Image (cartoon, rainbow, N blue to C red):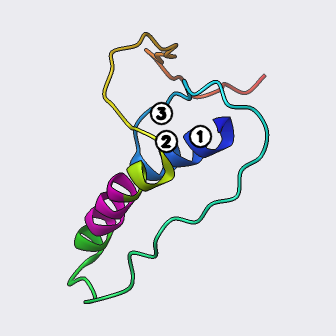
């Protein structure tokens, strides 16, 4: 489940934290959002895929819910070009 959470985070472009406590490997398949009417543009395709993911998660017996958590963030305040030595 930690792997699934990391993949969902990459796909949904937001943090996803695994709080299931489930260990081991699981085999499941999410629906293919490309079935049906083709999207008009890339943004519509991405929105359709995200909606498909959100709709299919409960079918797996899982739940995505928003929560406020603290996360580590690296802030870069300044960048300088290297100088010749």
In this view of the protein, which residue sits in the foreground, 74 or 66?
A: 66
| N-terminal label among 1 and 3 | 1
| Residue 9, numbered label | 2
**Point 46% across, 71% down: residue:** 31
Q: Residue 1's quadrant in the figure?
A: top right
Query: Is 24 left, or right, of 22 in this rendering?
Result: right
At horizontal 59% and vertical 40% (from top left) the residue drawn is: 6
Rendered position, 29 above or below 79: below
Q: Position of residue 85 (x, y in %)?
A: 78, 22
Looking at the image, which is closer to me, 21 or 41?
21
Give, as a single range, the part of the protein colored magenta.
Answer: 46-55
Q: Is residue 49 magenta?
A: yes
Residue 44 percent across, percent down from the top left: 23, 71
**Disc 1 target residue:** 6
Find out whether the residues at labels 2 and 1 contact each other: C-beta distance under 8 Å.
Answer: yes
User: Residue visible at 38% across and 86% down?
Assistant: 35
Badge 3 density bin: few <14, some 14–19, many ≥20, Cα 10 Å: some
Query: Where is residue 11 shown, x and y percent of the image?
Result: 47, 53
- Tell me the residue at 49%/16% (across/down): 73
| Residue linked to disc 3 | 16
Q: Are marks 1 and 3 in contact (CB under 8 Å)?
A: yes
């Amino acid at each position: 489940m930690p792997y699934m959470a990391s993949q969902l985070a990459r796909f949904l472009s937001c943090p996803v934290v695994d709080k299931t406590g489930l260990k081991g490997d699981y085999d499941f398949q999410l629906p293919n959002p490309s079935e049906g009417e083709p999207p008009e543009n890339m943004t519509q395709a991405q929105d359709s895929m995200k909606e498909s993911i959100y709709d299919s998660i409960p079918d797996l017996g899982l739940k995505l819910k928003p929560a406020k958590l603290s996360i580590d963030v690296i802030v870069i305040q300044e960048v300088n070009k290297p100088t010749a030595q």
